[in-house]
Image (spheres, helix red, strand yellow):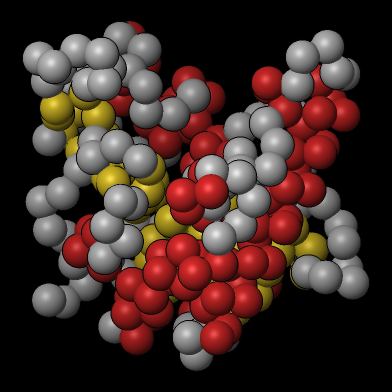
Amino acid sequence: MKPKYNRILLKLSGESLAGDQKTGIDFDKVVEICKPIKKCVDAGVQVGIVVGGGNFWRGRSSGDMDRTRADHMGMLATAINALGVADALEQLGCVVRVQTAISMRQVAEPYIRNKAMCHLQSGKVVIFGCGTGNPFFSTDTAAALRANEIEADIMMKATMVDGVYDSDPKTNPNAKKYDVVSFHEVLNKDLAVMDSTAASLCKDNKLPVLVFSLEDPENIYRAVCGENIGTIVDAID
């Protein structure tokens, strides 16, 4: 199989890094996820990654805590995950750079778009931590933002479901899975793909999004090669 895309932005959820233990980092699971990413790099694909932090902390689920402070804690959780993914990729032989939207120079580079582009063009994997660096924005929005900034061909959202459905397949056995769906429909029907800010950002910039299951990590490489997995969200009429 040959890659269909030259440059991708891969969004990994924090939960996917926790494995069966559900919280924290299961490093064996992280390595398993990183193996197909290494295959993509070896095939010449330029890879940017945005990681979530839900395996440690979710700002929007922080009860009565100040939302801004809670979101800052979530950003730090994504930095932990970014370092974990970087270590796994390095052990597999990739050259990796972690860039964070909040300055923490002792452990990562600050996010600089032109520097990220140079890294990607030289074959390095770039992992973007700390979301957008601002409260009230999800890591899905950060992924959409970074994907547009680095001029990715597609944003790939690896989730724990195998695509986009018209209703929750866990509660509705008759839920219909889409092969292709428009951003307009995602927004109007409030489909559980990503938050509306991220969807609007992709829609306005005509950036397609592929939503697929990470239950089999090899799906990452299959997706990059253009296999018919998951659901494509596109700016179609």
- Please determine whether, in this image, residue 55 is positioned above or below residue 195: below
Please tell me which residue is depicted at 32% across the width and 61% down the height of the picture: 217
Please tell me which residue is depicted at 22% across the width and 21% down the height of the picture: 169
Please tell me which residue is depicted at 41% across the width and 65% down the height of the picture: 33
Residue 111 x %, y %: 73, 60
Residue 97 x %, y %: 65, 75
Residue 224 x %, y %: 25, 64
| Nearer to me, 99 or 173 | 173
Q: Is residue 76 left or right of residue 180?
A: right
Q: Is residue 105 left or right of residue 61?
A: right
Q: Is residue 176 left or right of residue 87?
A: left
Residue 71 picture quarter = top right
Q: Is residue 77 visible?
A: yes
Q: Is residue 149 visible?
A: no
- Please determine whether, in this image, residue 61 is positioned above or below residue 107: above
Residue 144 x %, y %: 50, 42
The quadrant of the image that shows the C terminus is top left
